[in-house]
Amino acid sequence: MQKEYLKYILLLPRKLSVDIYRAEEGGFWAKIKELPGCNTQGEDFVDLVAMVNDAVFTYFEVPQKIRNTLGHYVPKISEDLRKKIGTNTRHSRIEEFVTKIIKDKKTLEFSKIGLS
């Protein structure tokens, strides 16, 4: 198990560039630029972040049993934007901010955080 874990620690990228788009039927879809053919979608932005993680782990064929031990990817959000969103923001407000962000800049950087 330790050898397999180390293999994926070395294999998985530390950062990803993710193009994010509003889907016509609702929700979002994303294209992970560094991984050809790696696209995903989510009903909302929070779901999309989870699906980006699933897509990356699937792309690298990471076994389910060790996925939780490898950390996860989260979008890098500026401190200024974080303050605007606030800590007590409702889910719908996050969607509103994300929609504004991707109008100007469709690519968000995701960084790997966690145990690895």
Image: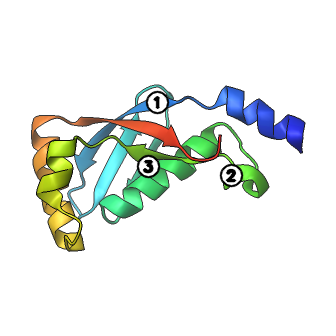
What residue is pinned by disc 2? 67
Query: Element at badge 3?
Result: strand
Q: Quadrant of the C terminus?
A: top right
The residue that appears at 24% across and 55% down in the rendered structure is 23
Q: Which one is in front in this view, the residue at disc 3 or the one at disc 1?
A: 1
Rendered residue at 46%/48% (across/down): 52
Q: Which residue is mark 1?
A: 15
From the viewer's side, name the closer residue of 5 and 39.
5
Q: Is residue 95 above or below residue 7?
A: below
Q: Looking at the picture, which amino acid does disc 3 mark?
A: Thr
Badge number at residue 40 = 3
Residue 19: % across, % down: 31, 36
User: Residue 110's spot in the image, x, y percent?
Assistant: 40, 38
Q: How is the image coloured?
A: rainbow
**Does the residue at mark 2 contact the one at mark 1 (Cβ under 8 Å)?**
no
The crowd level at tag 3 (other Cα within 10 Å; few <14, some 14-19, many 20+) is many
